[in-house]
Amino acid sequence: MGIGTAIFLSALVLSFAIIVVFTKDRVRWGRLLGITAAAVVGLAIVVGAAAFVFTSYWFNRAVIHELDGVSLGQNIQDVLFKKSDFTSKCYIDDDRSSVTYEFDDPAYKDRKLYVETKYDIVQRITLTGDLGYSNLKKSNSIFGSDDAEDVREKWGNEDFIRSTLPQVRNYIYRRYQLNVVLRNNRAVALVIFNPELYYLSANNAPARELDCFDATGKPKVKAGTS
């Protein structure tokens, strides 16, 4: 506290004391101070409750089951049906543990959706490019301009961090089934996953591209088959 502030507060207290002394017979200061204190406490409670309700509603963090119109546990046939207007490719891991379908959004050149499956069931979904158009609630949405502090402000402290490269970090929220990928401290991908099968490939683009659709457009390869 500076000298000027101390002098001001001292003068304020002294002035109040003088007013109380000269008006004690005409003003019921005890009652007035009691009413004032009660009003201040009541206002603090109301403001605190409003802030709590607003924060709980605005930052409504919950387990994520769907990203960009695709849900965990969904059959890949249903995904291909819904995404029929999107160009797609197919990849399979070298150990054949999973098959990943890549979808390009014709409206956004740099936007890609990777749907990773095991036995034709969606286990992990990755969105890259324009992240703002995900189905996350607006207050929790991740944008390409967001850094690690922004991610923590929206989703809280991560369960753990995994680094695949010195400039890349995965902020993993297992409790929300969410992984936010940052490169050079900028968000570049959103991932939601089945936490029981998170041993699936850590890369967004598995090793080999396949001709994995038959003449009818159905996938020819299932993960786990030889």
Image (cartoon, rainbow, N blue to C red):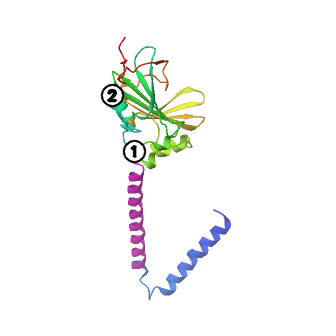
Which residue is located at x 47 percent, y 40 percent? Answer: 157
Q: Is residue 126 magenta?
A: no
Query: What number is the disc on residue 61?
Result: 1
Count of numbered tags: 2
Earlier-in-chain disc, 1 versus 2: 1
Q: Which residue is mark 2?
A: 77
Q: Quadrant of residue 72?
A: top left
Q: What is the distance, in whole Å, between disc 1 and disc 2 at their CAs? A: 30 Å
> What is the span of residues highlighted in magenta in the rendered image?
31-60
Q: Is residue 55 magenta?
A: yes
Provide the major secondary structure of the magenta segment. Answer: helix
SS state under label 1: loop
Given the image, on which type of amino acid does mark 1 rest? Answer: Arg
Q: Position of residue 186 (x, y in %)?
A: 57, 38
User: Which of 182/132 is in front?
Assistant: 132
Crowding at dot 2, Cα within 10 Å, few <14 / some 14-19 / many 20+, comes out as: some
In the image, 199: left or right of 17? Answer: left
Which residue is located at x 55 percent, y 82 percent? Answer: 18
Q: Position of residue 87 (x, y in %)?
A: 46, 31
Compared with 14, 4 (above or below) is above
Given the image, on which type of amino acid does mark 2 rest? Answer: Gln
SS state under label 2: helix
Q: Position of residue 47 (x, y in %)?
A: 42, 63
Quadrant (top left, top right, bottom left, bottom right) of the C terminus = top left
User: Which of 37/62 is in front?
Assistant: 62
